[in-house]
Amino acid sequence: MSSLTRIQLVLALLLGGTQLALPVWPQVHPIDAQHSVITVHVFKSGLFSAFADNHEIRAPISGGFLDETGRRVELVIDSRKLVALDPRLAPEKRHEVQQRMLGPEVLDSDRFSEIRFEASKVEQTGQDHFLVSGSLSLHGRTRPISVHVLRSNGRYHGDAVLKQRDFGITPVSVAGGTVKVKGELKIEFDITSVAGPNPAESHR
């Protein structure tokens, strides 16, 4: 305990205070990028969709934090590092999907390299259930978004649906529109933060 904290405690006792206003230490923890996962699901549509493939994309987190005291969240993704998983596709086909996804037809990742989610409001809706509201910046556009989140064993799980056109992205269409992807994407996340020391410990 620091000298200042001891003095405050003694003064409070001498003055006969029955309630002590102890400092509330902020609990801001970096996102654990190595143990957090964001997956994007892209679904097929169109007349010949039975002959097309759904796509599964990994979106590695490059930065961010969880602020437990201020109830704020920030996630940052480098769009250039998104990876098309699609294990059922042949390697050359998967490479084609990867190039199209990162290219000017979809993400245009060389121009818009950062994807950022900033939550400004977190409401608890039940035991370990939260409604997280904020903004998502993608492809040069920022739109409001709300996500339902479940906390379990120190991890945060949830999913959201995005409309590509809300961010200025036209869903990919080939073969005259007989094969295309749906305009809505499903985002799934499983996130944890880096456990750090209690900030109070460093003031002892």
Image (spheres, rainbow, N blue to C red):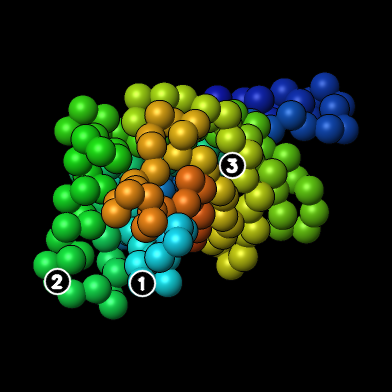
> In this view of the protein, can residue 21 be seen by the observer?
yes
Q: CA distance from mark 1 to mark 3?
A: 47 Å
Say which residue appears at 57% left-offset and 50% top-offset: 160
Tell me the SS state at disc 3: loop
Tell me the SS state at disc 1: helix
> In the rendered image of this protein, does residue 58 appear above or below residue 15?
below
> In the rendered image of this protein, does residue 82 appear above or below residue 114?
below
Choose the circle earlier in sequence order: 2 or 1: 1
> In this view of the protein, can residue 27 be seen by the observer?
no
Q: Residue furthest left?
A: 92
Residue 194 in the image, given as x and y percentages of width and height: 41, 53
Q: Which mark is residue 51?
A: 1
Choose the circle earlier in sequence order: 1 or 3: 1
Residue 153 in the image, given as x and y percentages of width and height: 58, 67
Contact, mark 2 vs mark 3 (Cβ under 8 Å): no
Question: Total number of numbered labels?
Answer: 3
Q: Which residue is mark 3?
A: 68
Dot 2 surroundings within 10 Å: few (below 14), some, or many (20 or more)? few
Q: CA distance from mark 2 to mark 1?
A: 18 Å
Locate residue 154: give its quadrant: bottom right
Q: Which mark is residue 91?
A: 2
Callout in the foreground (2, 1): 1
